[in-house]
Amino acid sequence: MPLPTRDEAWDLLCEWIQNEGLRKHCLAVEAAVRAYARKYQQDEALWGITALVHDLDFQRFPDMDDAENGHPRTALRLFESLNWPPELIHAVAAHADHLHVPAETLLDKTLRACDEITGLIIATTYVRPSRDIRDVSLKSVKKKWKDKRFTAAIDRQEIAHNVADLGEDLDAHIQLVLQAMQAAAAELGLDGGGN
């Protein structure tokens, strides 16, 4: 089944998502998952594109209780109609807890482990005077991790569970995701340029 090119996936994402924050989230998760693909010697294109499109329908269909169209149901139907790889479709389904699709593959588990932690790292960057992710350290992310009032909507227990399910150490995971995002600082608008 055909995997879209990175450009095709990005164009589709931009068609579906106008919100810059959500686009940046998708790019951050892509950077992290690609880093894991390299670490695990997996198909970086497949893994990266899966991560890039994992929230494709969230802006249009954010009501996850909508059993017909709620995120990510609409995107899953779209990916199936485009004959995208079943591994991609399963990973996107598995990242949504409310669908009760088990995370079985390494890709499934990696996407789940990388999804929420990117939000904490982005928020940590935004409170730095420079607003440059390259100035963020593991120590500063861990400090914000411990402050339950900081980005209170980010479920630390869920992140820790997903990282453990992946078989990674939490600190090492945060460091790998942080470094992947730092390498994409300009694309993420986290290079202190005022984005």
Image (cartoon, rainbow, N blue to C red):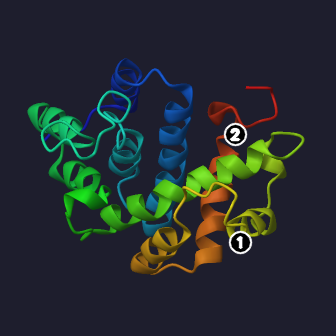
**In the image, is residue 15 above or below residue 153?**
above
Residue annotated with mark 2 = 185
**In the image, is residue 156 above or below residue 50?**
below
Residue annotated with mark 1 = 146
Q: Circle 2 — which element?
A: helix
Marks 2 and 1, the one that precedes in the sequence: 1
For the N terminus, give its image quadrant: top left
Is disc 2 surrounded by few (<14), some (14 to 19) or many (20+) residues within 10 Å?
some
- Name which residue lies at 37% across and 45% down: 45
Residue type of the residue flagged with mark 1: Lys
- Name which residue lies at 20% across and 48% down: 89
Pick the residue in front: 71 or 80.
71
- The residues tagged by marks 2 and 1 sit, at their Cα atoms, a distance apart of 24 Å
Q: Circle 1 — which element?
A: helix
Pick the residue in front: 59 or 178.
59
x, y (%) of residue 123? 69, 48
In the rendered image, which quarter is residue 187 located in? top right
Q: Is 76 on the left-hand or right-hand side of 127?
A: left
Residue type of the residue flagged with mark 2: Ala
x, y (%) of residue 133? 76, 46
- Name which residue lies at 34% across and 23% down: 16
